[in-house]
Amino acid sequence: MPKVIALVDDLFFRARIAETAKHVGVELEAAANGDDLLARASNANGAGAALILVDLNSLAAPLDALQRLHAAGNQIPVVAFLSHVQTELAAAAHAAGCTEVMPRSKFTQDLAAILERAREAKKAG
């Protein structure tokens, strides 16, 4: 089963992501902080992780974690989400190596499709 790693502080939102992941057929691993995200991604490169999800409004310094992930040569696609008014943060996330940055509302709306794409990409790869 393909894995998705998520750096998301909001427990209710993380539960929603986990439920959608289960429905779609992917395993969700929750990263507790930036160091944990980096460790999980390093362990997962080429070994099952299909996607990394990052809440850019996390209290766990997500932008720093993304920069460190990018510097480490991460090859796993990263989808980040934030408030639609945070355009500077979105640009910084792209610069830090995010594959895709979107407003939280769009992320929520497209969550199943995002996870399905990750599942299918892992099957193809």
Image: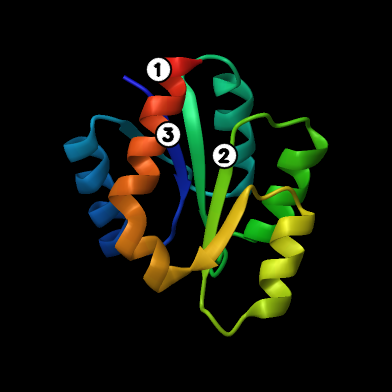
The residue labelled by disc 2 is 36
- Tag 1: Cα neighbours inside 10 Å, few (<14), some, or many (≥20)? few
- Tag 2: Cα neighbours inside 10 Å, few (<14), some, or many (≥20)? some
The residue labelled by disc 3 is 118
Q: Position of residue 123 (x, y in %)?
A: 40, 17
> Hey, what amino acid is under mark 3?
Ala
The residue positioned 42% from the left and 34% from the top of the image is 118
Whether residue 111 is situated above or below residue 40 in the rendered picture:
below
Whether pointer 3 and pointer 1 mark residues with C-beta atoms closer than 8 Å, the reply is no
Q: Position of residue 74 (x, y in %)?
A: 70, 32
Q: CA distance from mark 2 to mark 1?
A: 26 Å
Q: Observer-nearest residue: 89 or 58?
A: 89
Q: Which mark identifies residue 123?
A: 1
Q: CA distance from mark 2 to mark 3?
A: 21 Å
Quick check: can you spot residue 58? no
**In the structure shown, which secondary structural element does the residue marked by tag 3 occupy?**
helix
**In the structure shown, which secondary structural element does the residue marked by tag 2 occupy?**
helix
The residue positioned 57% from the left and 39% from the top of the image is 36
